[in-house]
Image: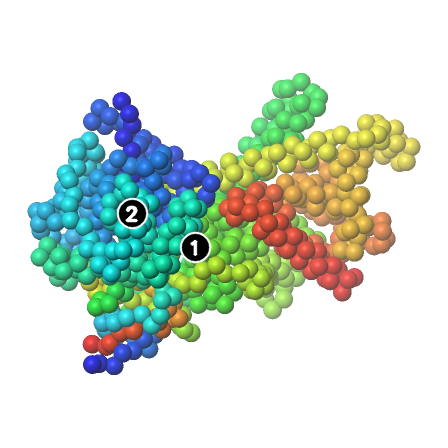
Amino acid sequence: MKKKTIALLGNPNVGKTSLFNRITKLNQKVGNYPGITVEKRQGTITANDQEYSIIDLPGTYTLFPNSLDEEVVLKTLLQKENEDYPELVVVVSEPSTISRGIIIYQQVREIGLPAIFVINMEDEINAKGLSIDYSKLEQYLKTKVYKTNARTGTGVDALIKVFNQEVGPYFGAMNLPASYQPAIDEAKKLFPLDTEYKTWLHLALDSQNIHPQDISQQLKSIRDKYQISAQQLQKEESIIRHDKVQNDLVSILSKSENKKLSFTDKVDSILIHPIFGYVIFFGILFFIFQAIYNWSGPLMDGVDGIFASLGEFVAANFPEGPLNDLLVNGIIAGIGGIVIFLPQIVILFLFIAIMEETGYMSRVVFLMDRWLKPFGLNGKSVIPLMSGVACAIPAVMSARNIENPKERLLTMLVTPFMTCAARLPIYIVIIGLVIPDRDFLGFNLQGITLFGMYLLGIIGALLSALVLNKIIKSVRNSYLIFELPTYKTPDFKNVLNTVWEKSLGFLLGAGKIILAISIILWVLGSFGPNDRFTQPEKYIAMEKPHLSEEEIQNEVSAYKTEYSYLGYLGQAIEPAIRPLGYDWKIGIGLLASFAAREVFVGTVAVVYSLGEEVDIEDDEQKATLFQRMKSEVNRNTGEQTYNFATGISLLLFYAFAMQCMATIGVVRKETGSWKWTAIQAGFMTGLAYIAALIAYQLLK
Amino acid sequence: MQNKVSLDKLSKNDEAVIDSFLNDTLPAKFYELGFAPGSIIKIKHKAPFNGPVCIQIKHDDSLIAIRKSEAALILAHKI
């Protein structure tokens, strides 16, 4: 028997996703709609001796689209050839905003789709001071009305049972204003099979992405002929529907005091207070970052330990040779380098998911919009920017819910400036080398510098937004309208599900690219063009005859690095980076950083003949690395390589340069444009080069 | 006829009835979320330094935030 497709449709914040999770029992797939970056959630269940494919459509207020998400909803419901075209639409609403739910329900019925109506959060009906006459409501909607509570599961089974039933016929529709009738009649020729309302809807859409281009053109010429605009039709409809529903509901719905609102009111008077609101928000931010660094430490050590012992195990148990080396130093080290960031990412997304679930995140948008707007960003840019402190990859993806295309693009372009987790190990090493471990006004200088690097990331993001804002043309007017939902205790199933999805997205998305580059780097570092690479012992014995066994061992790996392909590449780029104060050894580190920035530390450790396994958390090993790096002499200048000038130059370079291939990949996917991806990489790396150049030339 | 005033001019806790939009730049979404003519609204919060305004839509008790620049385009009369 054929699968029956059922779509869940409803406003944001009505608990639709919780309901979806309940119905599918988390047996779901999250992917993208073809060709665009809107998240698609689809689940499969078997019930009533039938298989159902359940689609969780993005939350939307009506069928008229303002964002990519909403366009997806409309396309799914409008196009019969769409693979997700539903055989039943389940309109989900919640008690207090039921009138909005009814409007979208009526729109769906009037385009000719069978639909049923669900009031979720039924436990709040009383608390919100509502009483509903259900039989009248059912009569009005011409369908059964189901009550559910997605948090406890109440009513969900009863809802699933009716998925099979035929929905009764629907009659009566919005009275289309008579003045538009000639235009509608003309449009009807384009869509002979569609209902009157659906024809009107076609005419009221001016988005390029809904209709094929020729139809879109013809609709436009009809609108032009009758001197009407799509906007005008949409507004007419909104007003007609709004007025009608308000009138009709008088006899169905009665209201007394809303207790939920008075609670939200009290909390809001503190959380979005003009002063305390900001104090609390920054307090929460501070707490989150504290938590990230304190809690993730042991977990990261654990991950590190596991991969180290896995590497040792493989090294010992597989036959020696290049394959063994590829497994240990290419693949296992590469995967370990990705997984090590998972704890920080999980913790950050845990907090972000909780903030979203409770309703606090929209308060943050409210507080921050004023301060981000001058930079061409939007209150909603806060979420990507915050996430960018863990990892730019999921952060760029979270820019999806910004409606305005320009503000979304800007947000994605500047998010990688935020100080991500991978920059931290490099900062720690370089700061440890060039900044004195002294107190200044009661604060540790190294600590202040690290904090300064975080600030620099934020400043870099905002100022770049300011510059790019002048360059990018706006297609649509910027506006901001969003709902502040009532506060709720988070649904932990949802929270965990979100964290799981984001983390998995990071692992798979970034993982592929980081792994591929790790392998390429391994190849470049493991082979060389001549016998200086293959027989380094011969040359070492000639150049430095008095070395001990262990020193020779380390010297061999340093020698091999220098004369590997990677080493030659480092030497090839040396002329370009010499003005920044770097030598070819740092050049190798820079090249290696393209896999992921943190690789720098491991790579320079090899270059400085310390062997691969340098753990900067281990004080003794750190001291050895520092000592070795401090004594390193730049053969171009004859000075200490890691002096103050080079150190600052390196810090600035790492703060600004786009060095993460995985981020480049994600930006390409999310912007859908190589042009913007290239502009971003060029802009960031150019800025990094110039900043590092100026700093070095001034300080040397 | 009462005096029409744009929403950005109202103070916290003022209540008003929406009359019309000053021009066509605001999308239909503003009507859909509750700024339709005839709707009763209450100013709940204002973010500092001309930040967004948080408005309660009386008929469904929802809280909607809009920028001050958009509030300036919505005309209403105080009640």
Q: Residue at x 70, y 24 (%)?
A: A322
- Residue B10 % position (x, y): 30, 76
Between A593 and A65, the one lying in front of the other is: A65
Q: Amino acid at mark 1?
A: Ile
Seen in the picture, residue A274 relative to A519 is either above or below; the reply is below
Residue A435 visible in the displayed image:
no
Classify residue B31 as left or right of residue A569.
left
Seen in the picture, residue A488 relative to B68 is either above or below; the reply is above
Residue marked by disc 2:
A188
* Mark 1 belongs to chain: A
Under circle 2, the secondary element is helix
**Label 1 with label 2: CB-CB less than 8 Å:** no
- Quarter of the figure that contains the N terminus of chain A: top left
Q: Amino acid at mark 2?
A: Lys
Q: Residues within 10 Å of mark 1 (few under 14, many from 20)?
A: many
Residue marked by disc 1:
A402
Total numbered labels placed on residues in the image: 2
* Mark 2 belongs to chain: A
Between A399 and A437, the one lying in front of the other is: A399
Q: CA distance from mark 1 to mark 2?
A: 34 Å
Between B31 and A434, the one lying in front of the other is: B31
